[in-house]
């Protein structure tokens, strides 16, 4: 089983800038992994509306955000009044994984949900 | 159209105490579809809890041996619980959308396209405020540049980030770096060092040329009803723009909706005054701060 650091996944539903296969594969693995997670439709949209839901997310210890470029994610949170501590990003306390650049395998591996990293298989039905 | 996250109920996949895992064949497409429709989806397990994200409706889905007892920090939260053992994807979506329709507010379709400022790089030079014709930028009480009217921003137009001398303006949904938030390399910095002369742009040279070209294109289009020629004219206009201002990448839709030259010049003057006022206030604040807290003289 993967470690239990909180995961926030962004679907980037409003644009086609994140490769579809990457975001689908990561989401499927996440869903199948048995790991708890938060997932949102679009961080940009939440930021634009200054969604107060971003504040508790930004304060989660050890948060791993699966979205796009770290610089963009950092300032999207900031623009919403929910800044992520820059030092926490620097020292890895908060990790931002980039689905625009990295492969789904690389991201799943970093999340600890790649094949062989989780005990719960994708076919875990009605266990 | 996608509704905003907080207007939509939050969907909780409950796989905690006294429950079984939801069928993987249902769970995968369900989560994908819900996210694509604008919902927030959370999965909790025996080892996790869920925090309050400000929603007013929570839909709890699971295969329950016993219905979970969920307590909310928020009294305003209504909880709907459903055992999905006999559900199909379609029946579940119908159930969830049915609850959403009761609470969602209609809102205009808007692609979240707006500038995000990287304050690690921004020097508060106000060039973006001077440049933008659509009142996207403003200053806050501390006279710091800020994005005030996101929805005024013209979709797919990243022109202000092109004129930023510090590469401090991001459009996360833009196709290429560093505007999309990618790391900034030396080539980017060299390119930005060749500053665009904002005053020349706002003096009317580029905008008047664009407007003129756009008017000619529209005129020719209306006279000749020749779609191909109109498109070619637009393309020439875009090519000319790219040549003149190093590819500001302003979409044709934005060019064709530019206000009149008089309006542009009036707006440019207003923006310039606003920027100058903010810069003057910044300088005054700095001066006052220096007077109140003079630099410490090293003592030996």
Image (cartoon, rainbow, N blue to C red):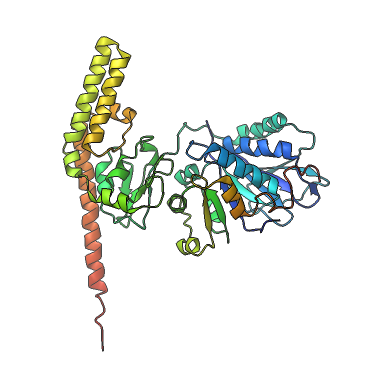
Residue B108 percent location from the top left of the image = 47, 31
Image quadrant for the C terminus of chain B? Answer: bottom left
Residue B161 percent location from the top left of the image = 32, 45
Number of residue marks: 0
Residue that protrudes farthest toward the right in the picture: B65
Q: Is residue B203 left or right of residue B148?
A: left
Q: Residue at x 26, y 68 (%)?
A: B289
Q: Residue at x 43, y 44 (%)?
A: B172
Please tell me which residue lies in front, B158 or A81.
Answer: B158
Please indicate, yes or no, whether residue B78 appears anywhere in the rendered image: no
Please tell me which residue lies in front, B258 or A4.
Answer: A4
Q: Is residue B213 left or right of residue A48?
A: left
Residue B8 percent location from the top left of the image = 59, 39
As displayed, is residue B147 above or below residue B120?
A: above
Residue that protrudes farthest toward the bottom in the picture: B300
As displayed, is residue A60 above or below residue B147?
A: below
Residue that protrudes farthest toward the top in the picture: B224
Q: Is residue A62 left or right of residue B299?
A: right
Please indicate, yes or no, whether residue B277 appears anywhere in the rendered image: yes
Q: Is residue B239 left or right of residue A52?
A: left
Q: Residue at x 45, y 39 (%)?
A: B112
As displayed, is residue B124 above or below residue B7?
A: below
Residue B299 percent location from the top left of the image = 26, 86
Please tell me which residue lies in front, A25 or A63.
Answer: A25
């Amino acid at each position: 089983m993967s470690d239990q650091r909180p995961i926030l996944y962004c679907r980037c539903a409003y644009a086609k800038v994140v490769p579809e296969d990457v975001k689908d594969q990561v989401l499927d693995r996440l869903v199948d992994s048995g790991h708890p997670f938060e997932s949102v439709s679009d961080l940009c949209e939440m930021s634009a509306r200054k969604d107060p839901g971003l504040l508790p997310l930004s304060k989660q210890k050890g948060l791993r955000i699966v979205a796009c470029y770290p610089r963009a994610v950092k300032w999207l949170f900031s623009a919403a009044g929910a800044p992520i501590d820059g030092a926490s990003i620097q020292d890895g306390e908060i990790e931002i994984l980039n689905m625009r650049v990295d492969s789904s395998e690389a991201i799943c591996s970093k999340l600890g949900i790649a094949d062989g990293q989780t005990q719960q298989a994708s076919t875990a039905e009605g266990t | 159209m996608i509704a905003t996250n907080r207007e939509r109920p939050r969907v909780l996949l409950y796989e905690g105490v006294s429950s079984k895992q939801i069928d993987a064949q249902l769970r995968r497409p369900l989560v994908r579809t819900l996210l694509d429709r604008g919902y927030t989806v959370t999965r909790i397990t025996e080892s996790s809890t869920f925090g309050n994200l400000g929603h007013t409706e929570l839909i709890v889905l699971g295969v329950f041996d016993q219905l979970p007892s969920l307590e909310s920090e928020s009294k305003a939260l209504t909880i709907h619980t459903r055992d999905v053992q006999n559900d199909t994807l379609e029946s579940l979506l119908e159930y969830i959308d049915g609850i959403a329709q009761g609470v969602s507010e209609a809102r205009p379709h808007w692609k979240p396209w707006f500038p995000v400022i990287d304050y690690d790089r921004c020097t508060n030079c106000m060039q973006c405020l001077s440049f933008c014709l659509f009142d996207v930028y403003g200053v806050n009480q501390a006279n710091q540049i800020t994005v005030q009217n996101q929805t005024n921003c013209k979709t797919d137009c990243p022109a202000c980030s092109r004129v930023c001398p510090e590469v401090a303006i991001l459009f996360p949904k833009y196709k290429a770096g560093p505007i999309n938030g990618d790391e900034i390399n030396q080539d980017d910095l060299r390119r930005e060092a060749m500053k665009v002369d904002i005053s020349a742009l706002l003096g009317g040279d580029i905008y008047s040329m664009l407007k003129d070209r756009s008017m000619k294109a529209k005129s020719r289009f209306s006279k000749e009803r020749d779609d191909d020629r109109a498109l070619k004219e637009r393309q020439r206009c875009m090519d000319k723009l790219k040549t003149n201002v190093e590819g500001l990448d302003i979409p044709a839709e934005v060019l064709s909706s530019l206000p009149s030259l008089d309006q542009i010049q009036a707006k440019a003057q207003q923006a310039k005054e606003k920027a100058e006022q903010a810069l003057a206030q910044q300088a005054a604040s700095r001066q006052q701060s220096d007077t109140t807290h003079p630099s410490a003289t090293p003592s030996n």
